Amino acid sequence: MSAPLLKVENLVKHFPIKGGLLGRTVDRVHAVDGVSFELEAGETLGVVGESGCGKSTTGRCILRLIEPTSGRVTFEGKDVTALAPNALRAMARDMQIIFQDPYASLNPRMTVAAIIGEALTIHKLTQTTREYTDRIVDLLEQVGLSADHLQRYPHEFSGGQRQRIGIARALAVAPKLIVCDEAVSALDVSIQAQVINLLEDLQAKHHLTYVFIAHDLSVVEHISDRVAVMYLGRIVEIASAKDLYTRPQHPYTEALLSAVPIPDPRAKRERQQKRILLQGDVPSPIHPPSGCHFHTRCPIAKPQCKAESPVLKTVGEPGDRHQVACHFRG
Ligand code: SF4
């Protein structure tokens, strides 16, 4: 196996909570609590979990849009977490992000041409005005828009079209890795499918690598080579998409999967279809439960789960790269 494009090692992000007259740190939100994974060039890792599980914070820490508390992120062998600001700006060309709400992330006072062209100017990627315009038109066409849209403003577009503009902007610098942070979550299901198809086409064309973050397992199924399931700041299971959807090991993955409709019951999935309803809400990440964070909701929890935190262990054959964090599974 070749060296990974991206390596995340024991990533931690705790947000301090300030309080009192002196504004001291009175508590911490344990947003990301020791996340590790590797990603090959050209691969897509789906990252899934309920709101507040730390998936978006993980994505932003990888790009250092948020400074991690500890841990290491290595991209093409370089330690991203140790880069000085200048080197980090240069590396930003290789690692881009697409946000959930394209309207909020696109400047309403800028035309589409200016939004996409901004990155070309910052990174001095074109030499002449003609080259600059041609490149923007080319990017628009790659995402299914056209030169007719150059001088229009974000509010003139639908949600799906705005997300296409966001994708064109990310593509402008010819990145190697794109973090898609809930990039399709705000779109209608039919539009979601179109944008996912577009992302797949662009991946094949440009050999892109994606970290594809979503709160719903059904959204990531078709685009992901592997899927990581997060719960309260930790990865509880990571496997190839095929393994995860057909042979889930972690009780939390089973519960999430039981909520995903199976379009054709005779199809590849062997998993049970009975809906597993978890009790209660996700506990606060300020004071996560001891031991296995999932023990307060787990249908098969035992006393050991409250006392001991399970580590990710490999299940199946070592080559399967299927890992689960549960004392009683695997
Ligand atoms: Fe459930 Fe215990 Fe496994 Fe955690 S370690 S998932 S609480 S059985």
Image (cartoon, rainbow, N blue to C red):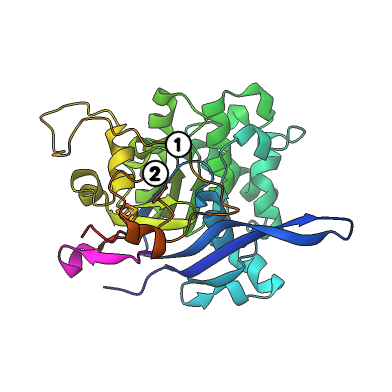
Q: Label 1 CB, ligand 1: below 8 Å?
A: no
Kindly identify the residue that appears in the image at 27 percent across and 34 percent down: 258
Callout 1: 10 Å neighbours few (<14), some, many (20+)?
A: few
Which residue in the protein does label 2 denote? 297
Q: Is residue 318 magenta?
A: yes
* Amino acid under disc 1: Gly
Image quadrant of residue 324?
A: bottom left
How many discs appear?
A: 2
Question: In the rendered structure, which disc, 1 or 2, sits on the residue that comes first in sequence?
Answer: 1
Image quadrant of residue 30?
A: bottom right
Can the viewer see residue 63 in this picture? Answer: no
- Nearest the viewer among 241 and 123 is 241
Which residue in the protein does label 1 denote? 280
Name the mark on residue 126. none
Q: Of all residues shown, which one is farthest toward the right?
A: 21
CA distance separating discs 1 and 2: 7 Å
- The correct choice, above or below, for 239 with respect to 296 in the image is below
Task: Determine contact: label 1, label 2, CB under 8 Å.
Answer: yes
The magenta segment is 308-320
